[in-house]
Image (cartoon, rainbow, N blue to C red):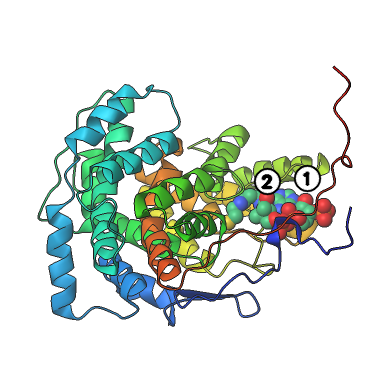
Amino acid sequence: MTDTEIKKGLAGVVVDTTAISKVNPETNSLLYRGYPVQDLAAHLPFEAVALLLWTGELPTESELKEFQEFERGHRTLDPKVKQAVDLLPIDCHPMDVGRTAVSVLGANHPKAEDSSPEAELEKAKALFAAFPAVVAYDQRRRRGQDVVEPNPELDYSANFLWMTFGEEQPEEVVDAFRVSMVLYAEHSFNASTFTARVITSTLSDLHSAVTGAIGALKGPLHGGANEAVMHTFDEIGIRKEESREDAAARSKAWMEDALAQKKKVMGFGHRVYKNGDSRVPTMKAALDRMIEHYGRHELLGLYDGLEQAMDEAKRIKPNLDYPAGPTYHLMGFDTEMFTPIFIAARITGWTAHIMEQRAANALIRPLSAYDGPDQRELPAA
Ligand code: COA
């Protein structure tokens, strides 16, 4: 061993600058290009937030309209993607489907190897537009249903739900979904974004970087937590007719037991935020609206009980995945689809970081401290 100080998991290490987002754990705030995320979530369509992340500025009305037209023109499920997805096992994880779809889209993009800023922006926009059809189709094929063609009358968020469920969703549901997309869009140097930057730093292409990022996002310590939250709810048992109080009592007891067994409970804790995740209040408000809309107060009971017991025992707060999981469940998404929805949102942040990395690139190649055996001789033959 050496006496070099090792920062396991790069905890606390600042590896580069970024102008895309600022996470401030002291004030529990998150800014995208200087704008508080809760303000963006309250007022802007997701398409406008995507443009902000990519270009650094809010779009003018005509820029937004132009991008929305582009998005509507690129949202049909690519037949080559459908063919590749159909080759995958019906029970493989939907994150594997998302990862494969991005890879296929990359291989078929006419500018696959062009990494000029103009080509990268065009590829980012096309990927943003194309990905919801992958999530929608994957959920449908698992249910034995056919593809639903996009609806050009609807914006990104409403159309995402349309292609998934085959019917228009009420405005408040579309709005809660839009809020979740804005909140999931970007979060500085998290594991998947850093993965995308590492891949870009080798001068690899945009789709390779996004494909690698999806691999990182799949893990339950990162994006996979929103799905894991729902598994916790399922394990406790969702009883539709139960009162909020009874549900809370059961989930509290479940959490006390889990913590006594030293289990890590997904949807709680964060590497950066130690006093609460800046995105949770906005997402929780959206969850509350969905609870009212669907009349499912027992879910709120399960939610409150876990949160209270965790706070009392360890003072650990929920992260964004905690309110997002039950929100997607109420909307009708299958649990395994939650993290692919996160991909659709985070494509914006990843691709913004890919462009930023490329603009001021340095190969990311850290050092390691060797702690294996000293040099030794092969045994005599
Ligand atoms: N459930 C139970 N205990 C938790 C916990 C959780 N979700 N998150 C942290 N802790 C505890 C750890 O057990 C540890 O306790 P100890 O000091 O008694 O051993 C302490 O809090 C520090 O945890 P640690 O894992 O070292 O913190 P970290 O900064 O490395 O981890 C996470 C951050 C996100 C990996 C971690 O909180 C976690 O695994 N959360 C669950 C997964 C999740 O929701 N991920 C989504 C993140 S947005």
Find the residue positioned furthest to the top. Answer: 381
Residue 310 visible within the image: no
Q: What residue type is labelled 1?
A: Leu
Does residue 41 appear in the picture of this structure?
A: yes
Is label 1 within 8 A of ligand 1 (CB to nearest ligand atom)? yes
Q: Which residue is rendered at x = 23% and y = 57% of the image?
A: 156
Residue 129 placed where, x, y %? 23, 54
Q: Quadrant of residue 73?
A: bottom left
* Disc sitting over residue 265 in the figure: 2
What's the residue type where badge 2 is placed?
A: Val
- Quarter of the picture holding the C terminus: top right
Where residue 123 sits in the image (x, y, percent)?
A: 26, 57
> Mark 1 to mark 2: distance in Å?
8 Å
Residue pictured at 45% horizontal, 73% vertical: 360
Label 2 near ligand 1 (CB < 8 Å): yes
The reply to whether dot 1 and dot 2 touch (C-beta < 8 Å) is yes
Quarter where residue 27 is shown: bottom right
Residue 198: percent from the left, percent from the top? Answer: 52, 57
